């Protein structure tokens, strides 16, 4: 079975590029453009990992991670951002 990856970003180009890259490497990919949509998709069918934009309108990446943890979901997350700042790093 292919690893299932959920890519979450509010930029269509980023979603397209990451989806194509992951598919070429054999991953099954679903996408969401908002954190709320991603949360619903994760509840419906949990992916093996999430690639998640930190800053999005509405529920951002860090808030989505906090909500998943609150619900006991510790799936692997890779964070991406076009707004890299030192204070975002742990």
Image (tube, rainbow, N blue to C red):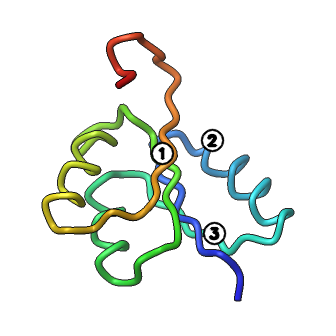
- Could you tell me which quadrant the C terminus lies in? top left
Residue 80, relative to residue 84: is it above or below?
Answer: below
Label 3 crowding class (10 Å Cα cut-off): few <14, some 14-19, many 20+? some
Q: Residue furthest bottom?
A: 1
Disc 3 is placed on an element classified as strand
- What residue is rendered at 35% in x and 21% in y? 88
Q: Secondary structure at mark 1?
A: loop
Looking at the rendered image, the quarter that the N terminus falls into is bottom right
Answer whether labels 3 and 2 touch (C-beta < 8 Å): no
| Rendered location of residue 81, percent (x, y) | 49, 28
The answer to which of marks 3 and 1 sits earlier in the sequence is: 1
Lower position in the chain sequence, tag 1 or tag 2: 1
Q: Residue at x 28, y 39 (%)?
A: 62
* Residue at numbered disc 1: 9
Which mark is on residue 14?
Answer: 2
- The disc placed on residue 29 is 3
Query: Left or right: 80 with respect to 86?
Result: right
**CA neighbours of label 2 inside 10 A, class few (<14), some (14 to 19), many (20+):** some
Residue depicted at x 46% and y 58%: 76
Tell me the element at label 2. Answer: helix
């Amino acid at each position: 079975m292919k690893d299932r990856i959920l890519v979450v970003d509010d930029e269509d180009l980023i979603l397209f590029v990451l989806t194509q890259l992951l598919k070429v490497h054999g991953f099954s990919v679903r996408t969401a453009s908002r954190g709320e949509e991603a949360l619903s998709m994760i509840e419906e069918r949990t992916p093996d990992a999430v690639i998640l934009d930190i800053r999005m309108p509405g529920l951002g990446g860090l808030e989505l991670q906090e909500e998943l943890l609150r619900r006991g979901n510790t799936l692997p997350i890779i964070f991406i951002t076009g707004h890299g700042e030192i204070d975002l790093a742990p």
